[in-house]
Image (tube, rainbow, N blue to C red):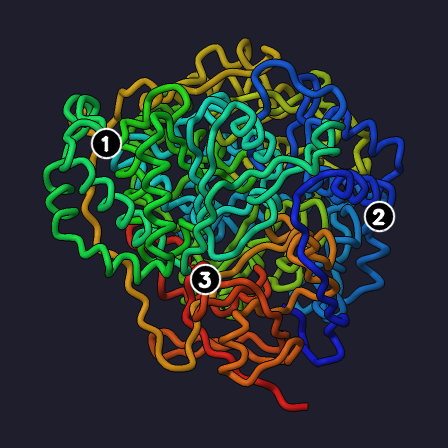
Amino acid sequence: MPNELTPERLKGLELREPYDYAAGISGVKVSLQHVNEYMNFGEGMHALLKLNQKDGFDCPGCAWPDPDGRRSPVAEYCENGAKAIAEEATKNRATPEWFAQHSIDELGDMTDFELGKSGRITQPMYLAPGATHYTPVSWDDAFGIIANELNGLDSPDEAIFYTSGRASNEAAFLYQLFVRQFGTNNLPDCSNMCHESTGTALSEVIGIGKGTTTLQDLHEADLIIMLGQNPGTNHPRQLSALKTCKDNGGRIISVNPLPETGLMRFVDPQDPINILKRGTKLTDLFLQVRINEDMSLVRAICKILWEKEKEAPGTVFDQEFIEQHTAGYEAWTDMLEATDLEQCISGCGIDRDQIEEAAGLIHGSEKIVLCYAMGLTQHENSVDVIKEMVNLLLLKGSIGKPGAGICPVRGHSNVQGDRTVGVWEKLKPELRDALRAHFNFEPPEKDGYDVVNSIKAMGEGRAKVFFGLGGNFLSATPDTVYTAKGLRQCKLTVHISTKPNRSHVVHGEQALILPCLGRTETDIRAQGEQFVSCENSMGVVQMSKGVLKPAGENLRSEVAIICGLASKTLGARSQVQWKDMSNDYDNVRDAIAACVPGFERYNERVREPAGFYLPNGPRNRRFGTEDGKAHFTVSPLSCHILEPGEYLMMTVRSHDQYNTTIYGMHDRYRGIHNERRIVMMNKADMAEAGLSTGDKVNLSSEYDGETRHARLFQVVPYSIPRGNIGTYFPEANTLVPITRTARGSNTPISKSVRVRITALTD
């Protein structure tokens, strides 16, 4: 959210032909360019060789799993993994002198790209009330400022403690322990904005809020269905798994409003023969669905399969699985019987012949894996949409057996692990009991604030301190102007960070930046060199041990920061041995093992080369629902009624970014270069609206009597269904209303916002 937007800020939009393949030699070249430009090249190569290795560190980017067995000794990472390392281990430094040279107003005028490229923060920095510049502060004084503000609140519930998915299991467990000993469950996290709908839906229908697959299941699948996903940009190592499935004779259906390059063809840069053959075609059938009409598509497929099942009972549906392991089948088939197939076909916008082809592929497959990401989770009906996907798997018995299951692809390393070890605004009764017994205190019972309710609490003056463990809260959240207003009303905002970001600019009455070690860096404590651990998308917990020299002598690990702050804030109120936890992380893991099921013998098992799997009942057809069965569910179809001149907008990432971190200004797979403030639009819609390529426009959204604005974008013709548009996140986040969220999960509707487009005149 720069202070001022003028036409001069646009960088000179350049459009090229989109790529027809992902990765390949060009991916290697770009990776090395980033390492060479932003790091000392020798250190960069050393780090890359240890990235995602059994004796190395976990990628700070996506949460895609590593192979259980042999890993590539040369490159167990992707292009965006290399960019993440170059970003974290940059040779640039944001020293106290750098902050002295840039006022808050000057920092606000920088783009997110410019802020991130300023370099690693090397000293705790403090912004006093009314000050124009951050100034250095000691760790002890920083902890004192925070402790004084926290202990001076009228209620612990006036403080909010946010967590990014970057935090390790050890840091996340200590963080939630500190917060709950302080007296609140206000523990919003980035899951609230991405896969909260997954946790809500899957917990209800299969009894666990996670996916059920392993990496081997994708390799063995007859059919993989990819929905609402762009793996080539957001988790490129998944492409190797898709290629293995294809090599083994599997098929792939891709469902998405945009024809993403990474779904179409993958060139394996480690396979010379694959390079010579121009890679592997991944998608056998691409279904270009309208935004948020995935349910209409899947309902149409199920209706077609139901008609075939009625003609030849037991030849299409897995009736043995349905009878033994499911509930709700009769109500679901009654709904299918009453379903209007033509209405579903019309709603999703896909030709009937293609839908019939998809149904045929599903009919002929015994082992089906269904993968999805935020293209399904960020709509008002996301919980229902995910349940509909489970219905499709249940009818085929494709859950709880090799080569089959549901695979929600998490977008940030250890976002799943943070939730597993207790970071959640809802404290589970079993964890409450364990914390009470092990640490001898009474955890709070009342649910805390999630992200959306935290923003509202700050905006309404009910929350006065904001503390962020990692991340860039302002840029990640919806309704950016309203979020900024809430942050500015706080008495204190604090961020544990590695580099400057937008949240440091939009601050409370006082502000602190606490610089921490990155995943890439060695962590030496009183008891010697330490390691942390993370959980990947498929429930594997593994160690992560940095290899590079820290970016500054005054950096502390997240674990050390949390322990120091907890000790200063809680004092004699806490019986936790914070110093022992800080000095030796084995003590933290022993505490996790005592409190969180599945972590028994944690210190022993995490030292095994490939880590260990956490329990997952549905993998063995043990469903953790009240009746022990997986549930078919009946949900209404989505319905987006657009007024004349309205479009349905989804926010997406460019290929040169990861979450809120902007690596560069190009989206080369889509052929969009030098600019991020763009609107991807159907050519026919452009013609109807009288718009041409590169035209400058403003966007607006109106919800609940309030109009929100995002100014100065450029129109780009793109292959997207009529009535739909695509914009980049976070530039268009200001249009996402805080008042509209997914039913049941309270996730912002960032993938289906009704907007209007207004052309600008020169």
Please provide percent x and percent y for residue 644: 38, 82
The secondary structure type at the circle numbered 2 is loop
Mark 1 or mark 2, which is nearer the start of the sequence? 2
Q: Amino acid at mark 2?
A: Asn
Mark 3 or mark 2, which is nearer the start of the sequence? 2
Please provide percent x and percent y for residue 331: 11, 42
* Whether residue 91 is visible: yes
Residue named by callout 2 = 92
Q: In the rendered picture of this protein, how many numbered marks are placed on residues?
A: 3
Q: Within 10 angstroms of label 3, few (less than 14), some, or many (20 or more) residues?
A: many
State the separation of the CA atoms marked 2 and 3.
34 Å
- When the figure is inspected, residue 656 is found, relative to residue 3, above or below; the finding is above
> Residue 316 — which label?
1
Residue drawn at point x = 41 percent, y = 62 percent = 752
Residue drawn at point x = 14 percent, y = 36 percent = 311
3 vs 1, front mark = 1
2 vs 3, front mark = 2
Q: Within 10 angstroms of label 2, few (less than 14), some, or many (20 or more) residues?
A: some
Residue 574 vs residue 326: left or right?
right
Residue 122 figure quarter: top right
State the separation of the CA atoms marked 3 and 1.
53 Å
State the separation of the CA atoms marked 2 and 1.
59 Å
The quadrant of the image that shows the N terminus is: bottom right
Q: Are dots 3 and 1 in contact, CB under 8 Å?
A: no
Residue drawn at point x = 14 percent, y = 25 percent = 323
Q: Within 10 angstroms of label 1, few (less than 14), some, or many (20 or more) residues?
A: many
Mark 1 or mark 3, which is nearer the start of the sequence? 1
- When the figure is inspected, residue 520 is found, relative to residue 234, above or below; the finding is above
The secondary structure type at the circle numbered 3 is helix
> Residue 458 — which label?
3
Please provide percent x and percent y for residue 63: 56, 34
